[in-house]
Amino acid sequence: MKWEIKQFNSLVSTNTTARDCPVGTIVMAETQTGGRGRYGRVWQSPRGNLYVSFVFESNSMRDKYLSFLTGLALAESLPEFNVRLKWPNDVLLDGKKVAGILLETTKNKVIVGIGVNLISNPEKNMLYPTANLGGRLTPIGLVKRLMIQYDALLAVFDKKGFKKIRARWLDLATGVGETISVHLPTEELIGTFKGISDEGALLLKTGKKVRSITVGDVFLI
């Protein structure tokens, strides 16, 4: 895919700006004044970390898997770090969140926002413990790695479908076969993480049943 990088000093959020950009645009900002994560949570955006959004053309066969493609692309862009993936779209370093992904859709585009703690990480009032990469990568350096990994994984997806992507994602997933807690909008479930379905849902064994979960926050126990 042909990418064009647009770099800004400060934006409300890269995802917001990306909405008005053509497919193939990569929007980067040194800081965000209104960065956001899942469920409208605030994404703190001090300078030095990576805040970037990739603009994809909407594709009915691929859209629902983009968070897995993105998590895998990010993890495979960081071979010198022992990062792991946490369902649905977090990247962990030493069991702590080092990156997050936010997908938003427009009529014919999917915006994939990525935030990576390169040199600093928020420590107070966080839902999940956080970490940073110790300043060993620059924002543009990591984006260039991501471009390469995205193109490689999209080629795999187009040829093999989600099955191959799922296998590689699970190889890097944390908590598989272990007891986890899943916080849903109306309840908390505790069970064994059995993997992910063909549709990308989390498979949680509670008692004798295996539940398929599409929305929730996962915590390791």
Image: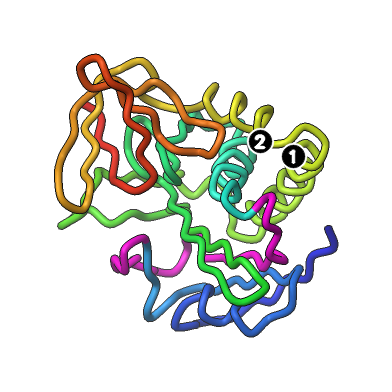
Amino acid bearing label 1: Phe
Q: Residue at x 25, y 27 (%)?
A: 180
Q: Give the range drawn in magenta.
A: 38-62
Disc 1 target residue: 157
Left/right of residue 33 with respect to residue 41 in the rendered view:
right
**What is the quadrant of residue 86 in the picture?**
top left
Mark 2 in CB contact with mark 1 (< 8 angstroms): yes
x and y percent of residue 203 in the render?
38, 28
Cα distance, mark 2 to mark 1?
Answer: 6 Å
Viewer-nearest residue: 110 or 16: 110
**Residue highlighted by disc 2:** 162
- Name the side, left or right, on which 162 lies relative to 202: right
Amino acid marked by disc 2: Phe
Q: What element carries label 1?
A: helix
Residue 40 percent location from the top left of the image: 31, 69
Q: Is mark 2 on a helix, strand or loop?
A: helix
What colour scheme has been applied to the protein in the rendered image? Answer: rainbow
Q: Please state the horizontal and vertical placement of residue 99, each as a whole percent of the image.
A: 44, 49
